Amino acid sequence: MKNMTIRLCFVCLSAFLFFLSGCASSVMMSAQRIDSVESDYAMVTFARPAVYLGDGISFGIWDEENFVGVLTAGSYIQYITKPGKHIFMARAENWSILNADLKAGKHYVVAARIFPGIMTGRVALTPANLEDRETIDKWFEKLKPTTVNLKKADAYIQPHLKDIQKAIENVKSGKTTAIDMESSNHL
């Protein structure tokens, strides 16, 4: 009886996670790659190479309360924004937070990776090793560029806003630590 209960819980959890990943990915659509950024703006590319482990897990990317998009395995999002200080956040089983001071006219690359967690997976946002330009170029060749479907964005944003606001509060108060991205870490 106990084994049957465990199996039923596992099946229900799997179905729930499958449902969530489908809903999250529908907010995104195909995009064209952006090769350069205007001199008054900065661009951050969030890349998620497919590695099989955790490929079914998708997660939202935020610039404080500004929704950047949902990142799925084998995709990337190019986010154009004003230069200056930004707090980039991603959430799977955990929060991964990256402080950035973006410079105008620069292109930054952030790798988003999934690691095993307790129930699903844990996310890690890390500045890409820009000295390994060959790997970054391969990402752009193999990964699919995506962008937010603005008609569906609000349905994704609204249920997450309270969690986002709490995470921002925790970062600003020092309760949550963030990784600092070097301002020289750009293409």
Image: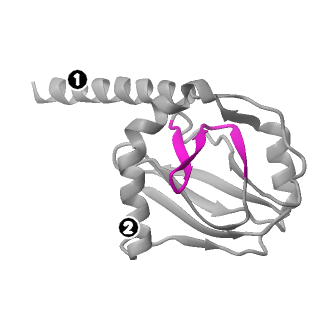
Looking at the rendering, the stretch of residues picked out in magenta corresponds to 57-80
- In terms of depth relative to the viewer, which is nearer, 8 or 94? 94
- Regarding residue 117, the answer to whether it shows in the image is no
| In the image: residue 44, left or right of residue 37 | left
Image spot of residue 181 (x, y percent): 66, 71
User: Is the residue marked by circle 1 packed among few (<14), some (14-19), or many (20+) residues within 10 Å?
Assistant: few
> Quadrant of residue 40 in the image?
bottom right
The verdict on residue 66 being magenta is yes
State the residue at coordinates (42%, 52%): 164
* Residue at the image point whose x is 40% and y is 59% from the top: 167
Total labels: the figure holds 2
Amino acid at pointer 2:
Asn
- Where residue 133 appears, x then y in whole percent? 87, 60
Report the residue at 23% width, 28% height from top. Answer: 9
Residue 182 vs 39, above or below: the answer is: below
Q: Residue at x 11, y 30 (%)?
A: 2
Query: x%, y% of residue 8?
Result: 22, 23
Tell me the number on the disc at residue 173. Answer: none
Identify the residue under disc 2. 170
Q: Quadrant of the N terminus?
A: top left
Q: Amino acid at mark 1?
A: Leu
Question: Residue 179 lies in what quarter of the image?
Answer: bottom right
Badge 2 marks a residue whose secondary structure is: helix
| Residue with the mark numbered 1 | 8
Q: Given the current orientation, which residue lies at the most extreme left position?
A: 1
The answer to whether 179 is drawn above or below residue 60 in the figure is below
Give the class, few, some or many, for how many residues have Cα within 10 Å of label 2's Cα (few <14, many ≥20).
Answer: few
Q: Which of the pair 129/96 is nearer the observer? A: 96
Chief secondary structure of the magenta portion: strand
Q: How far is disc 1 from disc 2 in space, using C-alphas?
A: 36 Å
Q: Nearer the viewer, residue 155 or 98?
A: 155
Asked if residue 46 lies in the magenta stretch, the reply is: no
